[in-house]
Amino acid sequence: MTDAFGLIVIGDEILSGKRRDRHFDAFRGLLQARGFALAWLQILPDDPALLTGRLAASMGEDLPVFCCGGIGATPDDHTRRCAAAAAGVPLQRHADAVAEIEAQFAEQAYPERILMADLPAGSTLIPNPYNRVPGFAIKRHYFLPGFPDMAHPMAHWVLDNQYAEGGVPERELSLKVFGAAESRLLSLMEQLTADFPSLKLFSLPRLGPDGFVELGFRGRDGLEPAFAALRYELQSPRD
């Protein structure tokens, strides 16, 4: 069962600041609404060697991943070729992608737009309601355009059709500890982390005269016993 997804956002324009990322908040909200978590985010440049390596690494993990950006036909769009190399397959003209692009652009599909039908062999298509130029999926990686107006509806389609069962939402329980520096709580946190390894213990200090440390657990099962242990240890006399 899938509980979380990775997210890769590709494009020099994000890293240079020419465009602001609009995917992180959108995907986090989209996934959380369906009971999934966002496990990690990577923002990567238009660098073929780096893209191929990172995609190969994530394809080797047991986690589905959304990838936004770089699937166009311009010289700086490397994602299709890098995805093929990472998956160990050749690029191949996908007949159904050709049909979609031709249906949208007719003779203007050639010679440039049709290049977007060259996909990693064995890919399945992700329909694009905006302009019919499809995304593609291979090895549980879902490759979408960089444009949020296209990518986000396409991600909805992936989740509706591939992960309709939804996930089990994460929960968290926490409390605020006043009058104690985070460093004084370190041994307690190490003990609780060892006692409840299936949960994520978090510590969020707030600085200032009214500062405190928010201390708690995040996870899916067993939160109540862990939280009870946290409260007990905090209320127990300590040297």
Image: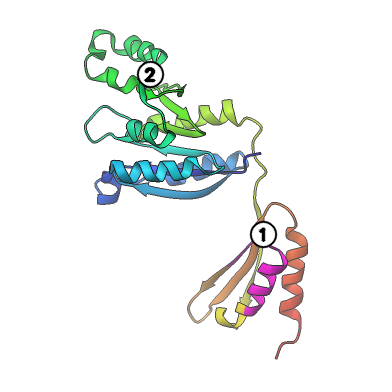
Are dots 1 and 2 in contact, CB under 8 Å? no
Res 97 → quadrant: top left
Looking at the image, can residue 214 be seen?
A: yes
Q: In this rendering, is residue 19 above or below 148?
A: below
Which residue appears at 72% of the width and 71% of the height?
A: 230
- C-alpha separation, residue under disc 1 versus residue under disc 2: 43 Å
Q: Which residues are magenta?
A: 187-202
Q: Nearer the viewer, residue 5 or 169?
A: 5
Q: Amino acid at mark 2?
A: Arg
- 199 to 159, vertically: above or below: below
- Left or right of 7 in this view: 173: right
Question: Label 2: which residue?
Answer: 132
Whichever of labels 1 and 2 marks the residue nearer the N terminus, that label is: 2
Question: Which amino acid lies under the numbered mark 1 shown in the image of this protein?
Answer: Leu
- What residue is at 42 percent from the left and 33 percent from the top? 88
**Pointer 1: residues within 10 angstroms few (<14), some, or many (20+)?**
many
- Where is mark 1, residue-wise? 199
Residue found at x 58% / y 28%: 162
Quadrant containing the C terminus is: bottom right
